[in-house]
Image (tube, rainbow, N blue to C red):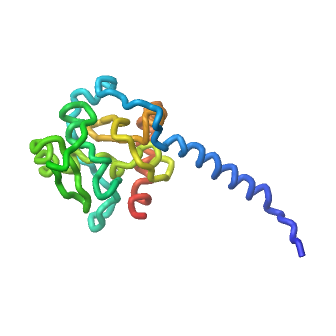
Amino acid sequence: MIIPCTRRPLFSTLVVSTLALTISLSACAPSTTESSQSASSQSASSQSAQPVSSTSSTADTAEPKVYTQEGIAIKGADPVAYFTESAFVEGSADYTHEWQGVTWQFASAENRDLFADDPEAYAPEYGGYCAWAVGQKALVAVDPAAWEIVDGKLYLNANQKVQTRWAKDIPGNIALADTHWPELSAQ
């Protein structure tokens, strides 16, 4: 027996909405054809950036989610160097610090010590996940070369294309991500 579907328009709307979100988030996938943006092309705001301790809305009893690959935070990038050198700098296995249950790498002992003294001042927002994607209610890997410091806080994005999209409305995108991060970080 075949029962006619009387809710087809609603189902179609949901499918189309889901497809649109999937297509939008597909732009977050790291591109192998794009070259990394040089530090000199980052915004003037990041040139003399001072870190600001993050005020996380995640409960103090649970460690927030941190983007890692093989237990290493943010693909091994040195989070302090974004502030001190205004550049994406690879960290080294020689200089590490454990924080929030993961290993953070640094280019120098000095950067490691700065981070250890105040990790929330240097750690990227949203656990190092793509800032634009968090605003879209998704956790997406990042390209550490796609970054921006805004009001003393480090934001990473999936790739340069997504970084450009995110930069078109930084305050709006941050507000969206701030709204969705508590739920996403608890997953």
Q: Is residue 159 left or right of residue 38?
A: right
Is 94 above or below relative to 34? below
Residue farthest along the right direction in this orientation: 1
Identify the image quadrant of residue 1. bottom right
Where is the C terminus found, in terms of image quarters? bottom left
> Which of the two residues, 22 or 186, is positioned nearer the viewer here?
22
Q: Residue furthest bottom?
A: 1
Residue 133's spot in the image, x, y percent? 47, 46
Percent across and percent down for residue 185 are: 39, 59
Question: Which residue is painted at 34% across and 54% down in the image?
Answer: 69
Q: Position of residue 25 (x, y in %)?
A: 53, 45
Q: How many marks?
A: 0
Looking at the image, residue 163 sits to the left or right of residue 112; the answer is: right
Residue located at (26% from left, 48% from top):
54
Q: Quadrant of residue 114?
A: top left
At 83% from the left edge and 63% from the top edge, which residue is drawn?
6
Residue 75 picture location, percent across and down: 32, 47
Q: In the rendered image, which quarter is residue 58 located in?
A: bottom left
